[in-house]
Image (cartoon, helix red, strand yellow):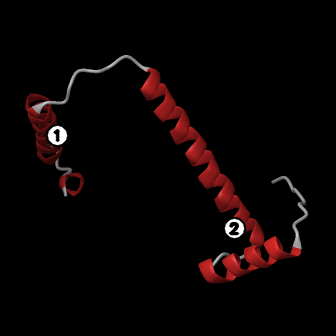
Amino acid sequence: MSTMNISLPEALKTFVDEQVKQRGYGTSSEYVHELIRRDQDRTHLRGLLLAGASSAPAEPADQAYFDAAIAFYLDDVGAAAALGFAALCA
């Protein structure tokens, strides 16, 4: 694992230390890792939303669409149950 050193003003360091204590992180590095992971997730979601917004319009999701989706799901659950995967059906 690589190491990165950062400099923080005292107020930010105090804030980080408080967050580590209050949220149960073992170290300030764990807290920063979590912040970075969340930012990666937000960046990925933003990309997906922008891609969706710029894509061609889809067919409307009417009652027939949801009926077909429910039937598909129920068929999958039934098939899994028939194969003995009852835990997957719960």
- Quadrant where the N terminus lies? bottom right
Say left or right for 21 vs 14.
left
- Badge 2 marks a residue whose secondary structure is helix
Residue depicted at x 20% and y 25%: 60
In front of the other: 4 or 53: 53
Say left or right for 85 vs 25.
left
Question: Which mark is nearer the camera, 2 or 1?
Answer: 2
Callouts 2 and 1 close, C-beta under 8 Å? no
Label number found at residue 45: none
In the rendered image of this protein, does residue 59 appear above or below residue 83? above
- Quadrant where the C terminus lies? bottom left
Q: Dot 2, crowdedness within 10 Å: few (<14), some or many (≥20)?
A: some
Three-letter code for the amino acid on which mark 2 is drawn: Tyr
Q: CA distance from mark 2 to mark 1?
A: 39 Å
- Residue 36: quarter of image: bottom right
Residue depicted at x 13% and y 30%: 62
In percent of width and height, residue 40 lies at 62, 46
Say left or right for 42 vs 69.
right
In percent of width and height, residue 55 lies at 42, 20
Q: Which residue is mark 2?
A: 31
In the rendered image of this protein, does residue 65 appear above or below residue 18? above
- Residue 12: quarter of image: bottom right
Label number found at residue 73: 1
Q: Earlier in the sequence, mark 2 or mark 1?
A: 2
In the rendered image of this protein, does residue 53 appear above or below residue 2? above
- Residue 4: quarter of image: bottom right
